[in-house]
Image (tube, rainbow, N blue to C red):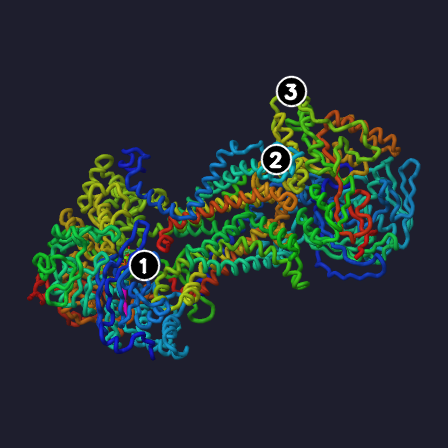
Amino acid sequence: MSMYNYVFRRVGFMAVTLFFVTLIAFAVTNILPGDVALLILGPNATDQSLEALQTQLGLNRPLYVQYIDWVIGLLQGNMGESLRFGEPVARLIAERLPRSMMLAVAATLVAVVLSVPLGVYAAVNQNEAPDVSASMFAFVGISMPIFLWGLVFILVFAVWLNLFPTGGYVSPSEDLVGSLTRLVLPAGAMGFALTAYIMRMTRSSMLEVLSEEYINLARAKGMSQRVIVLRHALKNAIIPVITVIAFQFSYAFGGVVVLEEVFFWPGIGRLTLTAIQSRDIPLIQGCILVVALIYMFSNFAADLLYAYFDPRIRYGGDD
Amino acid sequence: TGGGADDGTTEDSGSSGGSDGTESTDTTTASGGKQGGTLQWGGAVPVQGLDPHIDTSAASKRVLENIYEEVVALQDDYSIQPHLAESMEESDDNTLLTFNLREGVTFHNGTEMTSEDVLASYERVQNGDYLATGFFDHVEELRAPDDYTFEVQLTEPFAPFLAKMATAELSVMPAENAEKDMVEEPIGTGPYKFESREIETSFTMTRNEDYWGASDEDGPFIDTIVKSEVPDPSVRLQSFLADEYDFINGIAPKDVSRVEQAPDVRFEKQFPKSLVYLGLNCDVAPFDDKDARLALDYAIDKEKVAEAALYGTGQTTATPATPGSPWVNPDIEPRPRDLDKAQEHLDAAGMSDGYTATFKIPQSYPTQVQAAEVIAADAAEVGINLEIQQITWSTWLSDVYSNRDFQATTSSYLALWYPDVSFYKFLHPNGAFFFTNWVNEDYNALVEEARTIYDEQERAELYHQATEILHEDRAGHLFLWWQPSLYGAGSQYKGDIGAPDGSTLQFADNWLDR
Amino acid sequence: MSAPSTATDGEADDGPLLDVRGLRTEFRTESGPIVASNEVSFSLDRGETMGLVGESGAGKSVTARSLMRLIDSPGEITGGQVVFNGEDLLQKTEAEMRDIRGNRIAMIPQDPMSSLNPVMTVGEQITETIRRHQDVSKSEARQLAVESMDDVGIPDAEERIDDYPHEFSGGMRQRVLVAIGFSCEPDLIIADEPTTALDVTTQAKILDLLNEMQAREGTAVLMITHNLGVVAQTCDHVGVMYAGNLVETAELGDLFDRPRHPYTRSLIDSIPEVDTDYDELPTLDGAMPDLGNLPSGCNFAPRCPHATEACRTGGDPSLDAVGDGSSRAACLHADDLDLSESTVPEAGTGRRDIDRTGEPLFEVRNLKKYFDAGEGVFGNVHLSWEGGGLPTVERRHVKAVDDVSFDVYPGETVGLVGESGCGKSTVARTALRLLEPTDGEVYFEGQPLHELGSSEIRSLRREMQMIFQDPQSSLNPRKTVGQIVGRAMEKHGIATGEEKRERVGDLLERVGLSRAAAGKYPHEFSGGQQQRVAIAHALAVEPKLIVCDEPVSALDVSVQAQILNLLNEIQEEENISFLFISHNIGVIRHICDRVAVMYLGKIAEFGSIEQVFSPPFHPYTESLLSAVPHANPDRETDRILLEGSVPSPINPPSGCPFQTRCPKKIGDVCEQDLPELEAVDGDDHYISCHLSEAEMSQRDSFITPSKRAETRPADSD
Amino acid sequence: MATEQETDRGRFTITQSQRDRIARFVRKFRSNTKAMLGFSIVVMLVLVAVFAPLIAPYPIEQTNIEDRSQAPSVEHPFGTDDLGRDIFSRVVMGSRISLYVGFGAISGALVVGAVVGVVAGYAGGLTDEILMRVMDAAMAFPPVLLALTLLVVLGPELSNVIIALAFVYTPYIARVSRSAALAERNEAYVEAAIARGESDSRIVFSEVFPNCMAPMLVQGSLNVSFAILAEASLSFLGLGAQPPRPSWGLMINTGRGFMETAPWMLLFPALAIGIAVVGFNMLGDGLRDVLDPKVEAIE
Ligand SMILES: Nc1ncnc2c1ncn2[C@@H]1O[C@H](COP(=O)(O)OP(=O)(O)OP(=O)(O)O)[C@@H](O)[C@H]1O
Ligand SMILES: Nc1ncnc2c1ncn2[C@@H]1O[C@H](COP(=O)(O)OP(=O)(O)OP(=O)(O)O)[C@@H](O)[C@H]1O
Ligand SMILES: [Mg+2]
Ligand SMILES: [Mg+2]
């Protein structure tokens, strides 16, 4: 019952946010300097042909009309055509998105696998050696820009140790092993950088939960430390962590912009960068919109997971 | 706009269609000695458009030159010889060009090439809006009197036309394709066939089994060529050294010594590839003042700039003419650094304390960024404050080139083996790539005249004079250096690397010896 | 059910079940060590109940947790013995302790809302205890859990066992906690304020349950509370704690008849009792000292009316037997003092009469306030899946206040009483237009507040002030007391500059603080002092009406009495009217002239104190009054225990809102018709009920005015 | 808005209890290792930045090709870069850029974010809903990506980097200050102020705002480190600080090409960034521990 209401409400929020997302995406790209028509026609174009193309593309209509048209197009699944590639934006994105997804998911997995146990361990041993070293580890992870970790990982694991390829992408359907070996370094580098935040959240969430009354009661019931930590505390502590994980997942999509460049991973990050560098406005709009959508949907998924983990929401206790 | 262009300006840009597909699987079949194998190529700049008539980028040409061919072709000695034509004739007044086409040349789609196809390809350019369209202002008529004869009737003697015919801008495609505005799947007659590509990711070509020119000596040998797009030079080099590629292009000058020292690696250098220059906008202050330009010229130590950026792989110059060609004026040298003279010119310009100007550098060229830093540091010593702004290539195109909204910039031309391009396209107000706003009527008259002259000696004389004017008047193009193409290949990679024009690649006579 | 007891039966039968000797627990804090439990000694026999009372921070909980060795860093048990079943628990290993916790010694915590793990079903939380300590299978454990839920009176235990805690009401959750406590048939249960967080009606039920369970299982109980009423109703023995020490222990009767420690006396006296009538509550000045900074003599000496020079020096006295009764006290003068008499002055004259002939100062007519249910702008939009097919969208409202009318005359105190969530605070806020009313009219001195614009309202605010429940939260932590109080004067142009400072100083003295308090920040004061600052803030603008929303609920009894006295005093001097909200019947009884009893957003009964506390009663009023625990062990009230819990204000029941729980429900009429609030016995007593007056008058009055002495039977010695 | 008590004694004299408050804060702060370490690093950075011209032994822009890519030595403790410039001097001067960007961007974000957040949190209802949805929407774009796009619009200048990053981090601050304001909104002192007849704007800025500062400070401090990292990423992509400015990000970008031949070109600027980022992170973390009563209760 209440779960439906909860979802219903989240969808409502998302719709409003989505509206602003499209507005921002449109606004930001439409103040980009550089004449689209000129970019299409190239430097040799004449003034007449420029003007003709501008009219043809509808570039000299009022902005709000262009916005409405764009949104209507979006609703019909039409994101326009890339100026740079001359292909439908949607197709370009659809081709690359799964790869970035693969990278972001793998990175998030690496981060979660590293950080959640570490955070729990740190919280349980608060202010002691394990806590301090976990913090240190986390600090190292966030102390450098992600691309630098990418470079370091390449140098160490690919060039010096020659364990993994330096980069590139192979489709898993073609060559699963090759695909996975190429995934290791970028996912590792990004996962490493994401670890800190998730760990920090796990730790503080865990600390908070450990000071809850029901934990005291569990101890008063004679439960062992292990049961208390794993059964009573973690289940509660993980709930806010989910939000952070979702956030980091979408953050990973931001990180891929640079990281994909380093590992020449042909995902949406590189596409976006190309689009920005060549001022391919429809493509920029499409890319940042899609990345923003991923943010929104991963948050939405987090909200659902949240509800799944938290029976108060699942069975409606909030109203 | 007048005048076509030979090569584009740099190795970027372009807008054109393309197609996509998935990568093919590697199948290495060795049938006899050199034949077979898959070449893994770590490429510097991603392949751009696939329409040879419109795409200006060298990156596209590096692959398209293996797929498309032209009626005539450039040779290593910069001479032009018939290629798809068996022979050619020029009338005495140089206005009628007659070509006897080869028989038995087939396109990749299996149809035979005839003069219809050549005619259709040329008419496409003539009637469309392509790179070489401007050259057809000098064409009176195109004719295909029979299946294997093709004629070009010029309105007047126009030397650059034949040279243009040797470039991809006039490559031959099937008539049915020539009717299309945009070619998405390239079909040519060349030794390699287009297989598939994924934009910004990879490009695959396969050997053309039915290539008309196939031979045991000249290939083509390699079955499949896979170009992986790896724009970052460090990453590319690292991957190459980790044996992930047989071959890479675009080695950064700073890494040359590393590649040279690496075991089992072939280092190849092809000089010259391109000319890098400092562009000054002669329409706006401060560079509308010749003395201000000269002050900057004297302030810069060009040897040092070239050394800083190129690590000894390049060569400074004061002329746009290709080194070693007859067009080079041997008497003109780059101005040596002389701070006193610089100050004199500043005084003359009424800017004794120097001046400030923005310095827009396309960020995708690390050598130019490095050079800019040294130039700015040198200039600062006489009070000339150049504020570096890194900009993207498209910003460069729209702001600097198109709107001419800049004060100083750097850019490059690809190897300009044909002098008209060097002297006309960039420096004549009617040139296709004129943007520094430097106008000198004497100079213009000289380069215009040169276009109609077929005698090498005579033309060279005109270009030598033009160079003098460029130098004395301190044109908006302040030439910095000529730089080479730098390639690395595994020791298994055999054959000559590169193409006569210095910037593209021809793989036909290359093979893999694994 | 063989519990692995650590003691042999023989041993256990010898001594007391629990013998605590010189227990000492310290906390190391930044500002030095705090001894939260100092030399605490007491013993407890099998099946007995001992109460541990004292003000907040006295060390009750720390003592209880020390018994179970549940003290965490930075705390540490630094001395003493806890002999349980003949064995010293302090010598046991952690693993051995784990076998005892929840098994031989169980705990019932204070707050049912936060003591159950929200992500585990109640069943899981009960069975895990059982399986931890008993060698039973999963299904057996589940069966046992169902039984124990049955035992504590959770209906439909079989179905509800898989529910999550939030699906239970507060009272039901407390039952679950009781079930967990008793699930392994422990020898000792430590109940730390098990009913403090509950409404009176629920509290009464839980106390009954505890008594019943204890009687059945023969379990000993250590009952921690600050409510002497609870002690009087449940305990055999009492220990009184003050500043980390046990200052008196005695059998229940002895403690109330003849307290031996002056602190105990004051504690008993400070409680406003429902059945007595006094002008001024006896108070205990000052507050409990900071445990990190104890006085050099007897800890209580600074507040003690009987303190002598000897008390102020020479350390804290030890707990020694006094007289020939069961009492032990830690007082130098325990033998000399006779504290059997209350220090309360002779029964008072009651509250002065109010002239209600003129216009009321404040009048509320048919006030309604509906909130959007849920959070956020879309919060109240609700998908309804009823009726099958496609869901329909509804907007849902919390009917927090639904048609409430009352008035307040100058100089009068009108009380609003009712259980948590019935809408008291909302009435107050809406009437003052801190919230926009959904409907209804509010007049202040004849001016229609509901029609005024926001700037007019703002200037009227000078006349109407508010005091809140949580004094700490009602004072901006970043401003000094002087700034807070002075701001109000400045705002309404009462005084500025030097004059303002002067007045602030006067005002602070008026509410019992020093002038120097103006320069301090709120956090430097105790709760009681903070509430004084809040009162000064309210008084600063010389209002005619002050709305007090539970102004004393967060305070300890001794401090509570001080504040109530202060409010009464101020009213007398300034002729201010109060709208006084409380759920504490005793407090209402003491401070109000008239009272409105609220239930589910509506007024059930309205009239003067005498009228409301005497028949005829609204059935809800009756059960509310009957449920109040009296701090008098000899008094038994015939309590009416209400079934179920308060329905949701989103979907209130049809007809009479109380019909779902009413013990006197007469039938369909209650379910269908909403009773009017009608005058009974004279024109100013209103009851909203379908019952006849006779049916509502079957019980005696809850108050016997001016007969305090008579209701205290144990005066003779 | 100081009361007479304060103004009489002069604005900058502090009362005893203020002194106690500060002393308490200082004591807690000093006993928190993380906070102290972070604070020391930040102070050190600020000192280096302020005295950079005195510390740096060489001019930072003069190129010297003969001395290019020298390994660390006595004359050049951090070595020289590919144009022969002293890396130590450049790293020292670079601290100015990083701090300028970090502080500049985050001060901007703090001003706007705090106002938006506090107003939204206080006003509630539709205002809150709309403001927060806008912030959500802005947050949906990854910071570096959004900053990148903005920089293409604004042009690659340091001041634009600051503007872009301020824009990008505003929603983060707004979110934090909103939830702080929301919590404060429920405190009775706000209602007391309404009951006293205060105007909304005064309540927001004089009552609620000061109480929301702590979480904003924490978030701000963490965001400074994000901004420093983001500047590096933007420089990596060519849109941050412009050469020959000694931006750490720019130096890393150049240095990465020399990772194997002249690793010091990368190492020292990277270390500098790492230290700065860790410093601000620790400071933020530590501040959170010190300022958050809940954490205090736990520890
Ligand atoms: N973890 C701790 N750290 C420091 N001091 C503590 C800690 N726990 C308790 N104390 C101190 O011990 C004293 C006694 O606390 P305790 O919780 O036992 O009081 P209480 O009598 O149960 O009060 P209440 O009625 O408020 O529950 C308090 O003054 C408190 O300051
Ligand atoms: N701002 C609000 N939004 C939605 N519902 C509210 C709001 N404020 C109060 N309510 C609801 O209105 C009802 C009455 O609340 P109110 O605070 O007036 O009760 P109360 O009698 O003062 O209770 P308590 O004794 O717990 O203070 C409750 O169900 C509460 O949940
Ligand atoms: Mg307690
Ligand atoms: Mg209330």
The Cα atoms of the two marked residues, 1 and 2, are separated by 61 Å
Q: Which residue is mark 1?
A: C76
Res A32 label: none
Kindly identify which chain the residue marked by label 2 belongs to.
D
Q: Quadrant of the C terminus of chain C?
A: bottom left
Q: Quadrant of the N terminus of chain C?
A: bottom left
Relative height, residue C588 to residue A31 (above, below): below
Residue closer to the observer: C703 or B511: B511
Q: Which residue is mark 2?
A: D85
Residue A11, can we see it? Answer: no
At label 2, the amino acid type is: Arg
Residue closer to the observer: B402 or B216: B216
Disc number lying in front (1 or 3): 1
Region of the chain picked out in magenta, as a range: C188-192
The Cα atoms of the two marked residues, 1 and 3, are separated by 85 Å
Judged left or right of residue A302, residue C713 is left
Q: Which residue is mark 3?
A: B347
> Regarding mark 3 in the picture, which secondary structure is present there?
helix
